[in-house]
Amino acid sequence: MSIGLLLLIVVGLGVIGYFLGRRRALASVSGDPRRLHSLPSQYGQSVFLFTVVPALLLLVVWLMAQPQVIDRQVRGMVAADGSEGAALSLKMADVTRISEGLDALVARSAVTEEQLDSMRADFSDIRGRLAEVGVAVGADVEPDVFQAAKARRSLVGTSALMMSLAVLALAAAGFAFALNRIGPEFRARNVSEAVVMALLIGSSLVAILTTLGIVLSLISETLRFFQVYPAREFFLSGVWNPQFRGGSDLGIWPLIWGTLYVSFIALLVAVPIGLLAAIYLAEYADKRVRGVAKPMIEILAGIPTIVYGLFALITVGPLLRDYFAQPLGLGNSSSSVMTAGLVMGVMLIPFVSSLSDDIINAVPQAMRDGSYGLGATKSESIRQVILPAALPGVVGAVLLAASRAIGETMIVVMGAGAAAKLSLNPFEAMTTVTVKIVSQLTGDTEFASPETLVAFALGLTLFVFTLGLNVLALYIVRKYREQYE
């Protein structure tokens, strides 16, 4: 039975239980809902929950545990010849691929179960039939691998049947149990609210567990990297030169410098323009102008970064090279820190302007009225009253924009190049941490090599850096909101 059909049966049984539970509750009080402890619908909800929730939990646990249990059993069959390490992993991959191909053949009625049982690894027709379903089998398939593939397919089928029976049995048991409990004194509302509370708690834990999983995976792979490459050289070296053949220099500082340099130029563009735009929209623009200008500015945030990257590569880069870099003798490349910084700054303008606009509007009107009452002009009130009051929120907006700039990749790839160097010349090509994370994890490279594992060390460094900025920004914004809400 497929997972979709199983889910449909369980949910359908729960829906039936809902209507039967509601009817049974009303029947227990001769149709007078006032004599019930809870609403009639809550009695139906309790039957639905007892039917569906335990069955779905069992289904999820079974699906998570099934591959591990089956692979452990099959691995013992394959490892009987002494295979281990990479060789064993390759054999297990072949077992999985062949077993899925056999499943597809049976599903298409290309072979029968009896023919499948009699097949051997040297069966001449099996390779051609597996190729029909997209599974390439070499001429040197070992007999133990083929037998393990058939055993794995049999175990998966048996496990699927047992799972279906167990899930349906649990759903039926929950259906009967909940329906039997219904009566005028049954506290169905408490059951429904407890399940909703558990659902809300589980939803809030998703983000926490996801973050925890990301951090733990980064830490584990970073520790593997430092086992094959000295941490001292990684944090203190000023040279980034991965060779992939030994003798690599993997110092992080050229990448940190490029990241900070590009982000600094981007913030030099985004912060003044975004803040001035926010002041105009909040204090000077009338409703018609604000209704048109603010959505137009926020459109910049919806443009894909690849489009910004193309704009930097085709337009901004050649313009800076021809009119600034070459005449001043500062470089001949269209890929530069200045190119990426300017384009990224344009992308960040709505991040600064929108949040700053909301923060300025949140400043109490009484502060403006008090300033005007003392004889201050509008510009003086903005400079000396409104901006100081909104300063914590504006700083938070700037820090959030900085975090966005530090994590940008596509604009840097197409606008700043891929050269890792320490230089003050803004018209030279440089690169950032995010770009190197992508480049180190792509291509035909050995995953266990330091040149690949270094991507996780870079990712953990970037994570800690941006996390600190985000925490600082949220702290400032929260402090601001507590003061003026």
Image: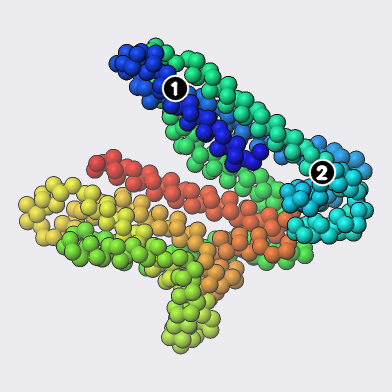
Taking 359 as reference, is 246 above or below it? Answer: below
Residue lying at 69% horizontally and 58% vertically, measured from the top left: 452
Question: Where residue 338 sits in the image (x, y, percent)?
Answer: 46, 73
- Crowdedness near tag 1: few (<14), some (14–19) or many (≥20) residues, C-alpha within 10 Å: many
Circle 1: residue type: Gly
Question: Where residue 474 sits in the image (x, y, percent)?
Answer: 39, 46
- Crowdedness near tag 2: few (<14), some (14–19) or many (≥20) residues, C-alpha within 10 Å: few
Q: Position of 105 compared to 7: left or right?
A: right
Residue under numbered circle 1: 21
Disc number placed over residue 228 in the picture, else none: none
Question: Where residue 160 sits in the image (x, y, percent)?
Answer: 70, 36
Residue under numbered circle 2: 113
Q: Secondary structure at mark 1?
A: helix
Q: CA distance from mark 1 to mark 2?
A: 44 Å
In the rendered image, which quarter is residue 311 located in?
A: bottom left
Taking 327 as reference, is 61 above or below it? Answer: above
